[in-house]
Image (tube, grey):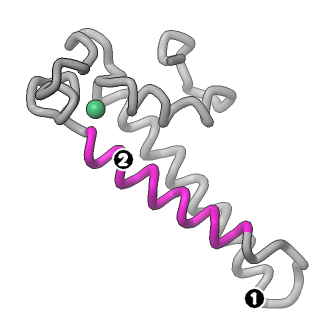
Amino acid sequence: MDRFADFLRRQIDIDLELLRWVREDAEAGSERGCYVSVIRGFRECELKTRLLRAHQWCGSGAGPCDQVGDAFPPEDERGCATRALLGLPYADRPGYAKRWRP
Ligand SMILES: [Zn+2]
């Protein structure tokens, strides 16, 4: 399960870094990027981080989805449907395993 969570955290970190570059370019006036899109991007990263944190123990027996019987079996490293869906935007990135598709 850790490999999938590590992959998700790494992708969110990459998104945050890309957003910081765009914001810095926009603030320096060298780029006419859409600042609203940058702000939305940061908010989406925060959302993904909070969801991942809330579901970090799903599939281990101690997560909220375990409590209601919706967690995936322990051998499924995605943990639960919420975590699996969090990975979907990154399905085209290197390191994403086909078996992780929701
Ligand atoms: Zn869950």
Depicted 64 relative to depicted 77: above or below: below
Q: Secondary structure at mark 2?
A: helix
| Residue drawn at the location 39% of the way across and 32% of the way down | 82
Q: Name the foreground residue: 44 vs 3.
A: 44
Residue 59, picture quadrant: top left
Foreground mark, 1 or 2, reads 2
Depicted 9 relative to depicted 61: above or below: below
Q: Secondary structure at mark 1?
A: helix
> How many marks overall?
2
On whether residue 39 falls in the magenta region, the answer is: yes
Depicted 88 relative to depicted 13: above or below: above
- Image quarter for ligand 1 equals top left
Q: Report the disc number at residue 27.
A: 1
Residue 67 percent across, percent down from the top left: 11, 28
Horizontally, is 11 left or right of 83 in the view?
right
* Quadrant in which the N terminus appears: top left
Residue 84 percent across, percent down from the top left: 44, 26
Q: Report the disc number at residue 89.
A: none
| Amino acid type indicated by mark 1 | Glu
Q: Residues within 10 Å of mark 1 (few under 14, many from 20)?
A: few
Residue 63 percent across, percent down from the top left: 16, 34
| Residue drawn at the location 22% of the way across and 29% of the way down | 65
Horizontally, is 33 left or right of 44 in the view?
right
| Amino acid type indicated by mark 2 | Leu
In the picture of the structure, the residue carrying the numbered disc 2 is 51
Q: Which residues are magenta?
A: 37-55
| Residue drawn at the location 42% of the way across and 46% of the way down | 9
| Residue drawn at the location 27% of the way across and 39% of the way down | 55
Residue 95 percent across, percent down from the top left: 56, 26
Q: Name the foreground residue: 69 vs 94.
A: 69
On whether residue 42 falls in the magenta region, the answer is: yes
Q: In this view, which residue lies farthest toward the front?
A: 68
